[in-house]
Amino acid sequence: MLFTDENLISLCKNNKREGYDLLFQKYEKYIYRLCYYYTHSKEDSLDLLQEVYIRIYKGIQHFDGNRPLLPWLKTITVNVCLNNLRKQKISTQPIYDEGPSPIDLIASTSDVEAEIAYLDTKQSVVKGIQELPEDMKTAIILRHVEEMSYQQIGEIMNLPIGTVKTYLFRGRKLLKDKLKDAGVWEV
């Protein structure tokens, strides 16, 4: 049986374990992926995932069932990630997706040079985003990875839309400058 978000919320509000199990199963990959964008560590992402689950469990009774579930889950996840970053106050080194091995690329019938250039560019962009100041990095991830609106970003980050736009503008400019310095971005 396929459960809608409304069904899952109802089950959770009635303290049915099945509801929580299905809710977490449905959104686990999404929440983990979002946590991974902030930590770039499997272990830390799993720890944050557990913290998100606890917050969902504690907050589901107060959730307005007439509102969409996913934005609420995004807000909880981003807040948990930001709180974690504030606690750590250290910059994490990104762990890049390994992608295809060099042997796979050489044996491939596709354009090897284009594939390698793509992977190099991807690594440079991820590294550049990780080196941005925290607020700019968060705004960039929410806008360009999570494809959220300015309004949604403002709500999650508790900022006016104008400030969100400023963080995005400055973050993009810093990222562009970093990519130019790395020889990735050509004018």
Image (spheres, helix red, strand yellow):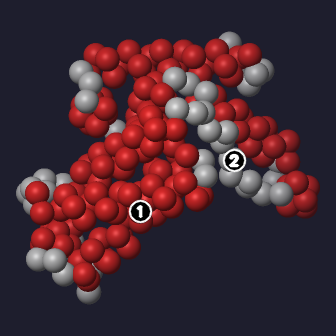
Q: Nearer the viewer, residue 118 or 54?
A: 54
Looking at the image, do the residues carrying marks 1 and 2 touch, with CB atoms under 8 Å apart?
A: no
Find residue 4 and report its horizontal and vertical position in percent: 21, 72
- Residue type at mark 1: give it: Gln
Q: Residue at x 26, y 83 (%)?
A: 18
- As drawn, the label of residue 50 is 1
Q: Quadrant of residue 11?
A: bottom left
Query: How far separated are the C-alphas under marks 1 and 2?
Result: 23 Å
Find residue 10 and report its horizontal and vertical position in percent: 12, 72
- As drawn, the label of residue 11 is none
Find residue 57 and report its horizontal and vertical position in percent: 25, 65
- Residue type at mark 2: give it: Tyr
Q: Residue at x 64, y 15 (%)?
A: 177
Could you tell which of marks 1 and 2 lies nearer the N-terminus? 1
Describe residue 130's horizontal placement relative to residue 100 as left or right: left
Residue 116, compared with residue 68, is above or below; it is above
Q: Nearer the viewer, residue 170 or 17?
A: 17
Q: For the residue carrying disc 1, how many other residues have a C-alpha within 10 Å: few (<14), some (14-19), or many (20+)?
A: few
- Residue designated by label 2: 96
